[in-house]
């Protein structure tokens, strides 16, 4: 019988070690485990907007600090939040499911497959993200947004593989950015 532990085997020290070694993809996976653990969810589950609202601010602050420090300001939740706030006024919220109307944040951080002449709103598969400092600012961490339950992945067009090849979920982006905003006041 297989059991799913609610307690992550990872720590902030493990995350720090991976980030300092520039093991970006492994660090992203540990980040996701730490976030899930912080809200009492099993390691292979996904974050919902409701769960994101429950992430302790200290957890977000600690993880963000490690990402920003290791990437010299290239990656981290605060980098994502700054980009999101700067680009959100440009987004037409009345047309969120149009594949030619991606949220500008998703394009800016390099999460979308790009086509000519306009960018498509289809997301890259997770393994196709850029796990190096060559990625655009705010590109990582990303697994908090990519890891989806099978049925949620199908709902957003992701073929059961997470967000890859699917559409944006503005509610998820809004939930994380709202949580970051509220935590920045603490």
Image (tube, rainbow, N blue to C red):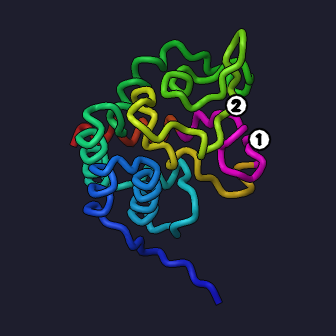
For the stretch drawn in magenta, the main secondary structure is: loop
What residue lies at 41% left-to-right and 71% top-to-bottom?
A: 8
Residue 166, how many percent across, how many down?
71, 38
What residue lies at 31% left-to-right and 51% top-to-bottom?
A: 21
- Of label 2 and label 1, which has the lower sequence position? 2
Residue 3 painted magenta? no
The total number of labels drawn is: 2
Residue 176, how many percent across, how many down?
45, 41
| Image quadrant where one finds the N terminus | bottom right
Image position of 172 (left or right of 76): right
Residue 134, how many percent across, how many down?
42, 30
Q: Which residue is mark 1?
A: 157
| Boundaries of the magenta span | 154-172
Quarter of the image for residue 67 reads top left
Q: Nearer the viewer, residue 5 or 24?
A: 24
Q: Secondary structure at mark 1?
A: loop
Circle number at residue 89: none
Residue 93, how many percent across, how many down?
61, 21
Q: Which residue is mark 2?
A: 122
Residue farthest along the bottom direction in this orientation: 1
Image position of 106 (left or right of 123): left
- Mark 1: few, some, or many residues within 10 Å (few <14, many ≥20)? some
What residue lies at 43% left-to-right and 49% top-to-bottom?
A: 53
Q: Nearer the viewer, mark 2 or mark 1?
A: 2
- Mark 2: few, some, or many residues within 10 Å (few <14, many ≥20)? many
Distance between the Cα atoms at labels 2 and 1? 9 Å
């Amino acid at each position: 019988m297989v059991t799913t532990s609610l307690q992550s085997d990872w720590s902030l020290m493990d995350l720090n070690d991976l980030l300092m070694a520039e093991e970006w993809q492994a660090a992203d996976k540990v980040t996701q485990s730490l976030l899930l653990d912080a809200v009492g969810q099993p390691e292979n589950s996904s974050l919902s907007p409701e769960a994101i609202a429950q992430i302790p601010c200290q957890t977000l602050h600690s993880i963000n600090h490690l990402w920003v420090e290791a990437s010299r300001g290239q990656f981290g939740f605060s980098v994502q939040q700054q980009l999101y706030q700067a680009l959100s006024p440009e987004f037409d919220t009345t047309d969120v499911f149009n594949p030619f109307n991606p949220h500008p944040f998703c394009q800016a951080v390099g999460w979308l497959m790009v086509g000519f002449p306009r960018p498509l709103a289809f997301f890259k598969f997770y393994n196709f993200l850029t796990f190096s400092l060559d990625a655009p600012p705010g590109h990582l961490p990303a697994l908090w947004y990519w890891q989806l339950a099978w049925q949620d992945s199908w709902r957003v067009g992701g073929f059961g593989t997470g967000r890859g090849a699917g559409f944006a979920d503005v509610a998820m982006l809004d939930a994380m950015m709202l949580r970051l905003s509220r935590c920045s006041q603490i």
